[in-house]
């Protein structure tokens, strides 16, 4: 046999599965159809800029990131914990009071922070803030919109900040995501300061791959996975490989095609990347729009950011990198460059005529949809010798991908050791 375990897919779940299997003393072969590792976590280099495929950030407060990733080695460049909001009157900043105490007066004067709504939000979040996971699984779940309505979070903070911010995080503006999942995400934002690695988000999977004894085999597409009864056969463009077990850690849709599982619904977005000669906003916060007639965005852009303010390594000297995100499931789905530029000009209050569009990434499979009820430990064994790993088997996040990969690997290792060696 070629290896004890064949891992299909060199995204975060596959790489974590391979690392855990290696730690368990097993031989592992990782197969990847693309030319590089990373899966959905990839970075392009364009004219001296680092351009991630999709606006992605690494939150060091995620439990799996703390457990499995050497964050200091990535030289994380952190965003501010808060947002800047554009409305008809101008710009205002809402910031985490403990991380940015000097901005507390502006936050309180913003008009978005009313005592009743803040108390209602805190009461809704409290169980998850106090205890990381048990509360999210032990309580009844419902859609995010229904949960916030029931909690009384219905004022300007909800309409103009929370809904817009979360739509960008979830790649979904429908409000139908699991409320318990969103609680876990907000917990991570409350306790962590997300950022970007100095060499781009792809530095994360590259760090993981560098720790493997066998480098992943890239540009090797898997077409079939067969459970033979005594092991597995994996058919690739270059021939057939054999192993004792397989972990299918391809993308959610690709994994379903290889295993016969039902593919999850996927949420999508488009990221637009502009080179600007000057920074339109000298702050490290996301910019949200609250100029719509009922609050929230007035146009297709759900958020924007001067990425180079938070992560200077993302832009060459003398230039700035500005990112804008539109959603594929809303009015932003059909947005063209002219509409995005109009939005950015209004949101930043400056001309964008000289900004150069350097990349546009349309990503229809950004994240698996996470409807209620939250099931963050989905079945991974799909055959006697085949397991599946990925954020679609856990939670739709970097944390979910890492956790799922580790969980699948430990189950496989336990089976291969047998009951007398466990």
Image: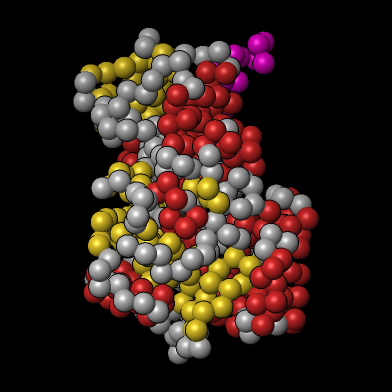
Q: Is residue 61 magenta?
A: no
- On the rendered image, what quadrant is the C terminus found in? top right
Q: In this rendering, does residue 110 appear at all?
A: yes
Q: Is residue 144 above or below residue 75?
A: below
Q: In the rendered view, does 365 fall on the left or right side of 281?
A: left
Q: Nearer the viewer, residue 369 or 22?
A: 22
Magenta stretch in the rendered image: 411-422
The picture places residue 282, in percent across and down from the top left corner, at 49, 66
Task: Write down the quadrant of residue 414 in the picture.
Answer: top right
Between 355 and 254, which is closer to the camera in this rendering? Answer: 355
Task: Evaluate whether residue 227 shows in this view.
Answer: no
Query: Residue at 45% of width from left, 84% of height from top?
Result: 291
Q: Quadrant of residue 353?
A: bottom left
- Taking the spot 36% from the left edge, 73% from the top edge, the residue there is 344
Q: Is residue 80 above or below residue 409?
A: below
Q: Residue at x 62, y 81 (%)?
A: 110
x and y percentages locating residue 26 in the rendered image:
51, 14
Q: Is residue 313 left or right of residue 418?
A: left
- How many callouts does the rendering have? 0
Residue name at image x 43 percent, y 57 percent: 307
Q: Nearer the viewer, residue 76 or 55?
A: 76
Vertical placement of residue 150 versus 358, above or below: below
Location of residue 115 by image quarter: bottom right
Q: Percent from the top left, x then y, of residue 15?
A: 46, 30
> Image quadrant for the N terminus?
top left
* Colour mapping used in the image: secondary structure
Q: Pinpoint residue 37: horizontal percent, then vertical percent.
A: 37, 33
Q: Is residue 419 above or below residue 304?
A: above
């Amino acid at each position: 046999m070629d290896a004890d375990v064949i891992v299909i897919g060199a995204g975060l779940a596959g790489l974590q599965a391979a690392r855990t299997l290696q730690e368990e003393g097993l031989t592992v072969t990782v197969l990847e159809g693309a030319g590089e590792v990373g899966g959905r976590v990839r970075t392009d280099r364009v004219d001296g800029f680092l351009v991630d495929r999709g606006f992605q950030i690494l939150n060091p407060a995620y439990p799996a990131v703390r457990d499995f990733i050497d964050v200091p080695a990535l030289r994380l460049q952190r965003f501010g914990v808060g947002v800047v909001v554009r409305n008809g009157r101008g710009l205002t900043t809402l910031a985490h009071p403990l991380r940015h105490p000097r901005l507390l007066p502006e936050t309180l004067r913003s008009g978005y922070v009313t005592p009743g709504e803040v108390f209602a939000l805190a009461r809704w979040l409290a169980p998850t803030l106090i205890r990381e996971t048990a509360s999210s699984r032990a309580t009844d779940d419902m859609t995010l919109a229904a949960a916030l309505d029931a909690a009384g979070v219905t004022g300007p903070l909800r309409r103009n900040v929370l809904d817009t911010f979360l739509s960008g995080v979830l790649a979904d503006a429908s409000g139908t995501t699991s409320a318990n999942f969103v609680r876990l995400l907000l917990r991570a934002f409350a306790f962590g300061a997300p950022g970007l690695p100095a060499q781009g988000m792809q530095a994360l999977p590259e760090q993981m791959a560098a720790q493997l004894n066998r480098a992943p085999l890239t540009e090797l597409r898997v077409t079939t996975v067969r459970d033979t009864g005594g092991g597995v056969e994996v058919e690739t463009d270059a021939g057939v490989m054999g192993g004792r077990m397989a972990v299918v850690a391809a993308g959610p849709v690709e994994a379903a095609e290889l295993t016969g599982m039902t593919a999850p619904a996927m949420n999508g977005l488009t990221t637009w990347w502009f080179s600007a000669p000057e920074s339109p906003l000298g702050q490290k916060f996301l910019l949200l729009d609250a100029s719509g007639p009922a609050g929230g965005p007035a146009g297709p852009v759900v958020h924007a950011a001067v990425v180079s303010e938070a992560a200077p390594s993302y832009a060459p000297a003398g230039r700035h990198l500005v990112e804008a995100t539109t959603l594929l499931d809303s009015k932003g789905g059909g947005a063209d460059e002219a509409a995005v530029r109009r939005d950015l000009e209004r949101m930043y209050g400056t001309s964008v005529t000289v900004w150069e569009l350097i990349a546009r990434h349309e990503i229809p499979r950004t994240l698996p949809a996470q409807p209620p009820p939250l099931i963050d430990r989905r079945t991974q064994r799909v055959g006697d010798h085949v397991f599946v790993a990925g954020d679609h088997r856990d939670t739709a996040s970097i944390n979910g991908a890492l956790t799922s990969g580790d969980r699948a690997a430990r189950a496989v290792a336990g089976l291969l050791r047998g009951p007398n060696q466990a």
